[in-house]
């Protein structure tokens, strides 16, 4: 069975490709390589010993997308392709809305045109906005605080409307918490371009000696040690969640939103300590002002994922840090 993976060369996409192949699916990758290295495809091939069919096409190129469907019989789409940097989205809203929203509409139109109506969408816990009602449950209202977040909120809406208009569609909106870690082989992982914005890639660069220290954004939150608490999830657990979601869609129509998280919160200082243990080095840090837009605590209610998909995470913080460090050293 052929599965089209948009953005399959990216961080979460590449891990999902590995899990799909290992579960026996044939994959086709489409990616414009704007935020990832071509070598990921080669590394997925090395890990799985399978040749990958890939198309270097942009989501804004409708005809290119249509051609992929005409050339292959595709049963389902896992849609990752999109821009994802919060700060950049504030500076370039038009690019974010055009790329993420028009890109998704193009994918859906090409799917409809070619009779494929099954999609797993890469959403985010960012759709819970500034809610302080932890754990975040899927029934909370959705909102965002920046253009990137609004693209996720709007795409969820578009896909829900599509399912209402045409009952043949099956859509899963997967709301990720904080994906970190890397494949246990150390061959694929997160390789941000420039100075990282997210905590784990930043810590890994400090551990490597490339950056001098970690800025801890605030130690006066209402949490056990004052630093921000997040639900960090191993990218391999997350990838497996996509397969479970897709398989659920094979026998269910309509749309569902499901959280993918561990249900456990970890603070910034606890993550730094876990990384120190993984790499055997001291990680210098300085406490600085809170970062605008950050919430104190964010973790998932995981009940729906367990009940609907029969999925739960298997890997803890130690493994996440160990796998991240293995990948970081190999780069
Ligand atoms: C961020 C985005 C979120 C996006 C997600 C993708 C913001 C406000 N949110 O989530 O929309 O879906 O990335 O992975 O940007 N921290 C530090 N020092 C750092 C970096 C982060 O102390 O150098 C702290 C933050 O204050 C936070 C925690 O670490 O408490 C995690 O931050 P980060 O990795 O950026 O993820 P989120 O902010 O949760």
Image (spheres, helix red, strand yellow):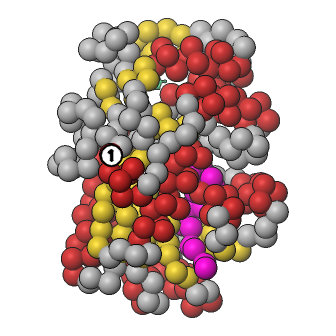
Whether residue 286 is visible: yes
In this picture, residue 126 sits left or right of residue 183: left
- Quarter of the image where the C terminus is located: top right
- From this view, report whether residue 272 is shown above or below residue 262: above
Q: Quadrant of the N terminus?
A: bottom right
* Residue found at x 33% / y 32%: 298
Q: Residue at x 25, y 44 (%)?
A: 137
Decide if residue 162 is on the left or right side of residue 40: left
Taking 247 as reference, is 165 above or below it? below
Against 318, residue 102 (above or below) is: below
Q: Residue furthest left?
A: 141
Q: Is mark 1 within 8 Å of ligand 1?
A: no
Is 129 left or right of 21, judged from the image as shown?
left
Residue 316, x across and y down, in percent: 55, 31
When asked about the image quadrant of residue 111, the answer is bottom left
Provide the residue span drawn in magenta: 1-15
Q: Is residue 221 left or right of residue 117?
A: left
Q: How many marks?
A: 1
Q: Which residue is labeled 1 in the image?
A: 303
Quadrant of ligand 1: it is top left
């Amino acid at each position: 069975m052929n599965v089209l993976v948009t953005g399959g060369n990216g961080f979460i996409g590449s891990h999902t490709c590995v899990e799909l192949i290992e579960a026996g699916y044939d994959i086709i990758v489409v990616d414009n390589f704007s935020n990832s290295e071509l070598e990921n495809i080669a590394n997925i091939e090395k890990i799985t010993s399978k040749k990958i069919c890939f198309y270097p096409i942009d989501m804004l190129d409708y005809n290119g997308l249509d051609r992929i469907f005409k050339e292959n019989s595709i049963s389902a789409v896992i849609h990752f392709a999109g821009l994802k940097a919060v700060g950049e989205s504030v500076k370039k809203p038009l690019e974010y809305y055009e790329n993420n929203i028009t890109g998704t509409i193009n994918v859906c139109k090409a799917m409809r045109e070619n009779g494929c109506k099954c999609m797993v969408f890469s959403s985010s816990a960012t759709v819970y906005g500034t809610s302080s009602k932890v754990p975040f449950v899927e029934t909370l209202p959705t909102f965002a605080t920046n253009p990137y977040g609004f693209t996720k909120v709007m795409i969820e809406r578009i896909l829900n409307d599509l399912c209402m208009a045409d009952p043949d569609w099956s859509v899963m909106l997967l709301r990720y918490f904080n994906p970190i870690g890397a494949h246990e082989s150390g061959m694929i992982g997160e390789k941000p371009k420039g100075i990282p914005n997210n905590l784990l890639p930043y810590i890994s660069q400090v551990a490597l000696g490339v950056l001098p220290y970690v800025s801890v954004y605030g130690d006066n939150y209402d949490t056990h040690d004052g630093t921000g608490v997040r639900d960090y999830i191993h990218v391999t657990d997350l990838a497996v969640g996509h397969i479970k979601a897709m398989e659920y869609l094979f026998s269910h129509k309509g749309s569902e939103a499901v959280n993918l998280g561990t249900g456990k919160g970890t603070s910034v200082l606890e993550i730094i300590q876990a990384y120190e243990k993984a790499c055997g080095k001291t990680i210098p840090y300085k406490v600085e002002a809170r970062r605008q837009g950050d919430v104190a605590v964010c973790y998932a209610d995981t009940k729906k994922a367990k009940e609907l998909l029969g999925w739960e995470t298997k890997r803890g913080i130690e493994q996440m840090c160990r796998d991240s460090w293995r990948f970081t050293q190999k780069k």
